[in-house]
Image (tube, rainbow, N blue to C red):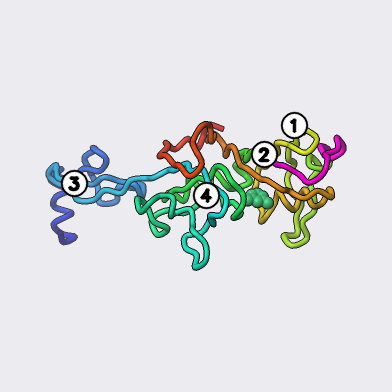
Amino acid sequence: MSHREVRAAIAAGRVQCNDLVVTSGDTHTDVFIRLSVDGKEVYHKEAVYIMLHKPPGYVSANSDSEHPTLFALLKGEYTGEELHIAGRLDRYTTGLVLLTNDGQWSRAMTNPSSKKPKVYEVELDGDLESSMVNAFAEGFYFPTEGKYTMASELDILAPRRARLTLYEGMYHQVKRMFHRVGRKVVKLHRISVGPYELGDLAEGQWKLVSDQVFDV
Ligand code: URA
């Protein structure tokens, strides 16, 4: 359709966006819309939100020449061109990863200012000490980034096992934080991000979810 034809169709009330008649050419629309003319769909872009249980060995990247990426687990249903990863995990870290084509949503999930908790289960090479709880709450200075980590919550579950809640996601953050208290992370698993919990989603499996940006 030419611009003139579109304007005429709008003026005649023949154009609908998300089931509402478009009244002006300037109508503001989201990127995710369903557009129809004379009741026939001419354009449809849907927002996609995915929860995936990452197995070890997969890289959080759109493509990689050496290792399988998370997109291999989506078995061609969605590609790295269509979706992006909202908060990466290291190759051997397991657990919850969120994928989407909605940039606003992924920013809301990952931006430290939106304070969405990311909860990790961690196994260490040595015993934890109660003084470490304070150290994690106070934060560590990361010279590479030139800033302090935000207050995080360390719950000691067993001598060498803890649950850690972060509100941000710096490069290798969990491993670097434990390194600062003299411990090496031997296993790392993410169980939740904001309102999304891994639950009983099996390793390697994924499912579509709805957008719950404002729930946490
Ligand atoms: N922190 C890490 O060190 N690795 C991850 O994969 C996630 C958080």
Compare residues 90 and 202 and report the one nearer the observer.
202
User: Alpha-carbon distance for marks 2 and 3?
Assistant: 46 Å
Q: Residues within 10 Å of mark 3 (few under 14, many from 20)?
A: few
Direction from residue 17 to residue 2 in the image, left or right: left
Q: Which residue is mark 1?
A: 157
Q: Residues within 10 Å of mark 2 (few under 14, many from 20)?
A: some
Across and down, in percent, residue 211 comes to 44, 38
Residue 211 can be seen in this image: yes
Q: Which residue is mark 2?
A: 121
Sooner in the amino-acid sequence: mark 2 or mark 1: 2
Q: Residue furthest bottom?
A: 65
User: Alpha-carbon distance for marks 1 and 3?
Assistant: 54 Å
Tell me whether the residue at label 2 lies in contact with that at label 1, contact meaning CB atoms closer than 8 angstroms.
Answer: yes
Q: Amino acid at mark 2?
A: Glu
Label 3, secondary structure: give it.
Answer: strand
Q: Amino acid at mark 3?
A: Glu
Q: Which residues are magenta?
A: 120-134
Q: Nearer the viewer, mark 1 or mark 4?
A: 1
Residue 122 within the magenta-colored segment of the rendering: yes
User: Alpha-carbon distance for marks 4 and 2?
Assistant: 19 Å
Q: Considering only vertical position in the picture, is 132 above or below 88?
A: above
Q: Nearer the viewer, mark 4 or mark 2?
A: 2
